[in-house]
Image (tube, rainbow, N blue to C red):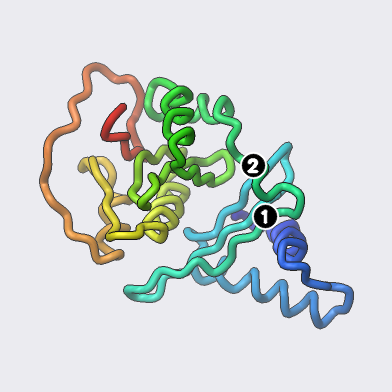
Amino acid sequence: MLPADLDAAVEVTAAAFSKDLGDAEAMRRWRERILYPWQTDPDGAFVAERDGGVIGVAEAIVRERMWCLSMLGVEPGIQGGAAGRDLEALAALTRQVRGAPYTSELRFALGRGDRLLRAGDRGFAVVDAVGHLWVLVARDEDAARALLWSALGLAQDGARVRWITGAQQWAIDVVGRAGLRLMAYGALCVRGTPGPLAPFLPSASFA
């Protein structure tokens, strides 16, 4: 979430929770409610957009060993409407980072009930039915960190993140702060230079 998104985030979340912001005091209190998590945990705050406008807001906070989803709101009339699932829009990002799009693989994953997380046009992650991270692709490390924290918060039977290479120090930092144990396992073999492959946590099934 950027400073320019704050006014829209206040409006969208108020509408999502049927908050009446008709008087100045109500507006002040709700704005402070949205502003505080963004100020303390900016890496955990992001918005969903459609046609350049904010349609959803998510804010997460981390307090020592506790992760908390502080806010999740979607503009009324859009909930359940597959907002953010325009898979073709993710193709340019995956080409830039991975060297090829994930479009067909994402259709497969979402078709079986996996969940897509978006950080605007800066990145996305997919979490499977039990909350394990399936893939993460981002333009920058701040977006990648926010997505990984959000994914970890969805784990139902113990969080698991696979295929973290030495190039993904941002991910090593997050899993360490989350209290997860790092283990050496397997290898990620790449021929040539398809893309920078960072920030990137590949799919175990489809690389």
Q: Earlier in the sequence, mark 1 or mark 2?
A: 1
Q: Residue at x 85, y 79 (%)?
A: 24
177 relative to 27 in the view: left or right: left
Q: Residues within 10 Å of mark 2 (few under 14, many from 20)?
A: some
Position above or below: 104 against 68: above
Along the line of sight, the residue nearer the viewer: 150 or 158? 158
User: Quick one: quadrant of the N terminus?
Assistant: bottom right
Q: Which residue is mark 2?
A: 83
**Answer yes or no: do the residues labelled 1 and 2 have beta carbons within 8 Å?**
yes
* Amino acid type of the residue tagged 2 in the rendering: Ala
Position above or below: 127 against 10: above
Q: Which residue is mark 1?
A: 74
44 relative to 14 in the view: left or right: left
* Amino acid type of the residue tagged 1 in the rendering: Val
How far apart, in angstroms, are the residues tagged by discs 1 and 2? Answer: 9 Å
Q: Residue at x 33, y 20 (%)?
A: 194
**Residue 7 at x, y = what percent?**
75, 60
